[in-house]
Amino acid sequence: MATDLTTPAPSRLDVAPIQRRTVRLLFLTQIIGGIGVTIGISVGALLAARVAGTALAGVAQSAGVVGAALLAVPVTRIMAARGRRPGLVTAYLVGAVGGVLVVVSTVLHLVPLLFLGMLLFGGGTAANLQARYTAVDLAEPARRGRQLSLVVWATTIGAVAAPNFAALADATTRGWGLPALAGPFAFSAAAFVLAAVVLAVLLRPDPLLTARRLAAAESPADPGAAPGSSARRRAGMVAAWRTVRDRPAARLGIAAVAVGHLVMVAVMSMTPVRLGESHSDADVLRVVGIVLSLHIAGMYALSPLVGWLTDRLGRRPVILGGVALLLAACAVAGTAGHHTPLLSVGLALLGLGWSGTMVAGSTLLSESVPTADRPGVQGLSDLVMGLAGAGAAAASGFVMRAVGYPTLTLLAAIAVVPLVALALRPAPVGAADELGRPADEVPDEEE
């Protein structure tokens, strides 16, 4: 930390190579972390259904989402005080501990330990989510959408293949004496540890601390921009909410991220169980792997294009495009019946809609608040997003058991309506959301 804080203030020319190196490193660790996260997602509901029953399968999935949401608070506090590197490393290591606990809980058939393990496993998701903000700490304003989306896209390489690796991991670890579906979580834990080590060694200088030094050099009259200033104290959720409350663009950014994630989690988390109704135990893991691979491809594969559109067309149009895709996904998946190819199309559209709301919403949020407030506001965004997704995941198991998968998709579609209303509200005059300027350069908006 001392090295990051005591080096001379950088110039814009100094920052460019640091940014390129940071994005390349995040690209690598997103691949590694994406493998770990997606293996857990692909088998989590099936494992929980076997250990705790179908009704609690959604609760187990929601535990991972809740874990990611709750961990966003301490992780962003660490980032605000010490930089991105310690926060990301901590999140990945907590996720690794969670993966180990899931394996132990399956061996001992302990349902409470399974839920605790899934809760901590969310650390891997928290790290993956915060990495997207790390990518824009030093990005030029006009390229923020593309830089953020490039890091999101990196997850594709590991995540698309990960569900299929789950079958290999399961077969391999059964030979070691582990129960069915437990072994993939051991592989996930190893991936998280590897990502943590790579970041701990190579993410230097820290991009957030460098951005603060740059902001302090360019705006010496702003005490909040300086390292060691009150910026560290702005990571609290109450302060973050006050910052967001006063900025309509920031509110829309958080709403887009949270609602898009809620709809995606609600439909996706119960899709493996839906597939299990029409496929044998011998085939279901392979089929789930294929369907989720297409879903994850929709989430990440086109994110560079989504980022380019975000910079080119503006944040609001891309958010509305994401909403349209989410509605189409719910319609297709809800009417697919047990027709697996059609269900796969619905899940791919679901992922693409999520990409639109996530990339455009995250970019809009980051540029709508001052530099000193960003870690706390970004943590608030991930907290709200995670809790929204957790509620959807927890309810999805009960909804599916009571009224079925088609009704679940209908309810998910209805949840999108408030976001449509918010996004269609006229943007305040002088707002930063379509201009790509930092909030530091834009006057506070008044409604």
Image: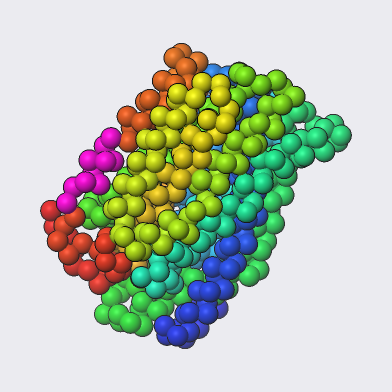
Quadrant of res 47: top right
Residue lying at 57% horizontally and 73% vertically, measured from the top left? 21
Residue 309, image x, y percentages? 38, 59
Kindly tell me whether residue 37 is visible in this rendering. Answer: yes
137 or 335: nearer the eye? 335
Q: In this view, does 9 lie above or below 259?
A: below
138 or 121: nearer the eye? 138
Bounds of the magenta segment: 417-426
Q: Is residue 319 left or right of residue 18?
A: left
Q: Is residue 27 above or below residue 59?
A: below
Q: Given the current orientation, which residue lies at the most extreme right position?
A: 175
Residue 302, image x, y percentages? 49, 53
Kindly tell me whether residue 134 is visible in this rendering. Answer: no
Residue lying at 34% horizontally and 47% vertically, measured from the top left? 321
Find out whether residue 420 is within the magenta segment: yes
Can you say which quadrant of the picture contains the N terminus?
Answer: bottom right
Find out whether residue 117 is within the magenta segment: no
Residue lying at 27% horizontally and 50% vertically, measured from the top left? 251
Q: Is residue 216 above or below residue 51?
A: below
Quadrant of res 39: top right
Residue lying at 62% horizontally and 54% vertically, measured from the top left? 157
Quadrant of res 146: bottom left
Q: In this view, does 187 lie to the left or right of 146?
A: right
Judged by its main secondary structure, the magenta piece is helix
328 or 323: nearer the eye? 328
* Colouring of the image: rainbow
Q: In this view, does 233 lie to the left or right of 447?
A: right
Residue 125, image x, y percentages? 54, 47
193 or 3: nearer the eye? 193
Residue 177, image x, y percentages? 85, 31
